[in-house]
Amino acid sequence: TMQLTPLGGLRGSDVFTFPLSVTLWSCILSKFWILGPPSAPDKTYMSALPLSARLYVGATIAIGATLVVVLGPRSDFSNIPLFVVLLLTSAITSAFKVSLPLAKSGSTMSVSYAVDFAALLLLGPNETMLVAVTSAWSQCTFRMNTKNPLYRTLFSMACLAITVQASGFAYES
């Protein structure tokens, strides 16, 4: 099997095998939300997206899920009260959005990113990844005018998992 070494404090002897990724891919590429029904005009299913976008979103979700599954259990939780406080604070503040004057599309940024950044400095990348993924889920689930499709929620969660691990890798280097 092919050996892959992910980010986030793993040593050379800590590797995971390719079949784990294949299993994640098979879940992601299931016809229920990648292919969707033959006609999916409302973007509830990924089938409404162009093929290149489906591949990009699917790959991002697979990488993020792999990071959470492999590195989440490696969290040492040395300061559980601080972890819980940051987790709850990040989840609650994810509902508060700041409008960004970047485009006419009404781009926003969540206040929870400040909490996630503080968590990265105080807890490390593995614990912060769990905090950030929870805040992304909260942001995509609560106080929404319209319900987000599952793939958008998973994509947002995966993006934060990847970003936190990459930031933690850069910070610890």
Image (tube, rainbow, N blue to C red):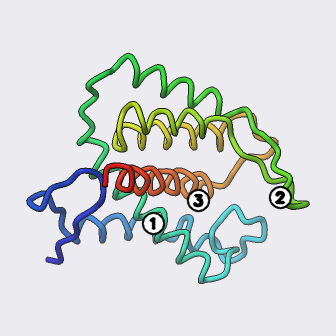
Label 2 neighbour load within 10 Å: few <14, some 14-19, many 20+: few
Q: Amino acid at mark 2?
A: Leu
- What is the x, y in percent for residue 153? 59, 51
Q: Residues within 10 Å of mark 3 (few under 14, many from 20)?
A: many
First reached walking from the N terminus: tag 2 or tag 1 = 1
Q: Amino acid at mark 3?
A: Tyr
User: In the image, is 158 to the left or to the right of 41?
Assistant: left
Residue marked by disc 3 = 151
Q: Is residue 82 above or below residue 69?
A: above
Q: Name the amino acid type tagged 1.
A: Ile
Q: Which residue is more in the foreground, 128 or 149?
A: 128
The mark found on residue 28 in the picture is 1
Which percent across, then down, holds residue 173?
A: 31, 55
* Residue at screen point 28% across, 62% down: 6
Q: Quadrant of the N terminus?
A: bottom left
Q: Around disc 1, counting alpha carbons within 10 Å, would you say few (fewer than 14), some (14 to 19), or many (20 or more)?
A: some
Relative height, residue 88 to residue 30 (above, below) = above
Count of numbered marks: 3
Q: Nearer the viewer, residue 18 or 159?
A: 159
Asked which quadrant contains residue 142, the reply is top right
Farthest left residue? Answer: 13
Question: Residue 125 at what x, y percent from top left?
Answer: 37, 44
For the residues labelled 1 and 3, the Cα–Cα distance comes to 9 Å
- Tell whether label 2 touches label 3 (CB within 8 Å): no
Residue occupied by mark 2: 102
**Residue 22, x across and y down, in percent:** 30, 71
